[in-house]
Amino acid sequence: MPVIPQKLYKYRPFSTYSVTEIERNEVYYANPKSFNDPLDCSPVIDVDVSTEMLETLCARMLLEKYGEEIGKPKVDADLKRFRYNATEPNEDGSPANVERNYRWYLKGAIEESLVRQMSRHGVLSLAQKWDCPLMWSHYADQHKGICIEYDTSDCRFETPKPVDYSGNRNIKASDLHGFYVEHLQAARERVFDGYFYHKARQWRYEKEWRVVRKGNGVDGSPYKISAIYFGVRCEASVESMIVKLFQGSPYEPKFYRMSEDTKTFKLRRYHPEMEDFLYESPALSTRWREEEIKSMFEDESESTN
């Protein structure tokens, strides 16, 4: 297991949700089916077992779908349908390869069941670096947003794992059988690694770490916010609003502004005086903050309904 970095990062646009998450120290565990990359958390099953083992695995996973009490007749009916469909002649009228077709139907049912079960989990995605220009562009509203730094030195509750960018999408049917039929812990870990922690090589610039748990949606962060970085294009009003959220808090994080390097394409950070963040411009009058924030929350609420 690689050494866990003491700091991990979340790039965010400025929005109602990001402000609320910061104020309440909450994070969002995403449903894997909602990822922008359709190949992420979408593995291919490598059928490396006999037809008998594949059938047993399929029956076990279908039984979890239907439930133990009423599931067995439905499972038997599904397997019977697969066997019948496997005997259908080919489009050109030639005899079917029944064994191959039957395995294909079993594999399809297993893949569908696996996706359904894994979608019950949520994924918290974090980055290893705060100075990645592509991450600022893709996930922080083209450098107008923020980057939240989390202190991961205390991993008693959630331990992050790094994403593997080897490009391997396969999950072995033998591991699925070991997980669901034989209840082997090692097989379970290999299935989870293959499902949640493998991505295409093209994404390796993200240097992503993930926390996977049951249930998705907003929940309390497993880590304390230790710093907030404001993008190169971040508005002063956004900086002031976020800094003021922490005024008087015993856990006030550090605040950094991002800047361009004058000679390279690298990003730098610097730590201004607190007065620079708290400068009260006319646009940040108390009335403006109250009315604009209320309007922003109402607009986003309507757009999500």
Image: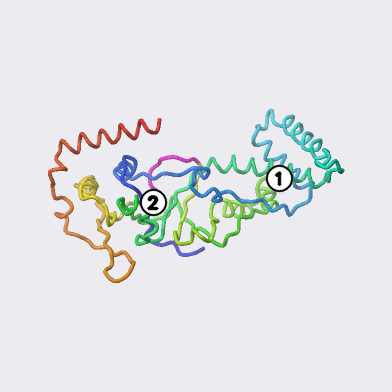
The foreground one among 146 and 211 is 146
Residue 274: name its quadrant.
Answer: bottom left
Quarter holding the C terminus? top left
x%, y% of residue 212? 49, 49
Q: How is the image coloured?
A: rainbow
Q: Is residue 58 left or right of residue 269?
A: right
Residue 298 versus residue 40 in the image, above or below: above
Dot 1 or dot 2, earlier in sequence: 1
Marks 1/2 in contact by CB < 8 Å: the verdict is no
Q: Residue at x 23, y 45 (%)?
A: 245
Q: Which mark is residue 107?
A: 1
Q: Residue at x 26, y 62 (%)?
A: 259
Q: Is residue 43 magenta?
A: no
Tag 1: amino acid: Lys
x%, y% of residue 282? 12, 43
For the residue carrying disc 1, how many other residues have a C-alpha within 10 Å: few (<14), some (14-19), or many (20+)?
Answer: many
**How far is disc 1 from disc 2 in space, using C-alphas?**
36 Å
Residue sitting at the far top: 70
Q: Residue at x 76, y 33 (%)?
A: 76
Tag 2: amino acid: Tyr
Q: Secondary structure at mark 2?
A: helix
x%, y% of residue 275? 14, 54
Magenta span: 215-223
Q: Is residue 156 left or right of residue 188?
A: left
For the residue carrying disc 2, how many other residues have a C-alpha within 10 Å: few (<14), some (14-19), or many (20+)?
Answer: some
Quickly name the residue at label 2: 139
Q: Which mark is residue 18?
A: none
Residue sitting at the far bottom: 263
Q: Is residue 18 left or right of residue 43?
A: left
Q: Residue at x 56, y 62 (%)?
A: 166
